[in-house]
Image (spheres, rainbow, N blue to C red):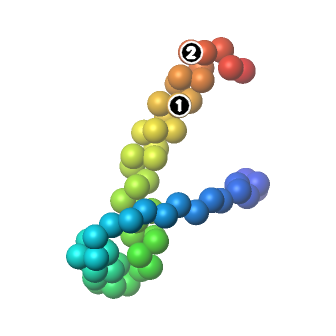
Amino acid sequence: MKPLEIRKQISIFISLSDWKAIRAEAARQKIPMTELCRRWMRPEMSRLLRRNEAADGRNGDD
């Protein structure tokens, strides 16, 4: 079983109209707004993590 990773919260400021659009889309999908944002961020986070892992390998940080 994978050990639990410590989690941190982030906060961003967006326009009220953007917030309402995100809220409406989350409601349409019947998921929390946080989960919707996670799903949208996941592809970019995967790319970022792969890039960082590749950079760590090149730097010899073993």
Q: State the residue at coordinates (45%, 70%).
A: 35
| Residue 40 falls in image quadrant | bottom left
Residue 52 — which label?
1
Q: State the residue at coordinates (53%, 23%).
A: 55
Q: Mark 1 or 2 closer to N-term?
A: 1
Give the answer, above or below, for where 1 lies relative to 55: below
| Residue 16 falls in image quadrant | bottom left
The N terminus sits in image quarter: bottom right
Give the answer, above or below, for where 61 lies relative to 34: above
39 sits to left or right of 54: left
Specify the amino acid type for callout 1: Asn
Give the answer, above or below, for where 39 lies relative to 16: above
Mark 2: which secondary structure?
A: helix
Mark 1: which secondary structure?
A: helix
**How far apart are the two marked residues, 1 and 2, measured between alpha carbons?**
10 Å
Q: State the residue at coordinates (39%, 69%).
A: 36
Specify the amino acid type for callout 2: Arg
Q: State the residue at coordinates (46%, 71%).
A: 34
Residue linked to disc 2: 58
Locate residue 13, reporting x and y percent: 38, 65
Q: Residues within 10 Å of mark 2 (few under 14, many from 20)?
A: few
46 sits to left or right of 62: left
Locate residue 52, reporting x and y percent: 53, 31
Give the answer, above or below, for where 8 lies relative to 35: above
* Residue 29 in view here: no
Locate residue 48, reporting x and y percent: 46, 38
38 sits to left or right of 23: right
Depth check: give the residue in front, 62 or 8: 8
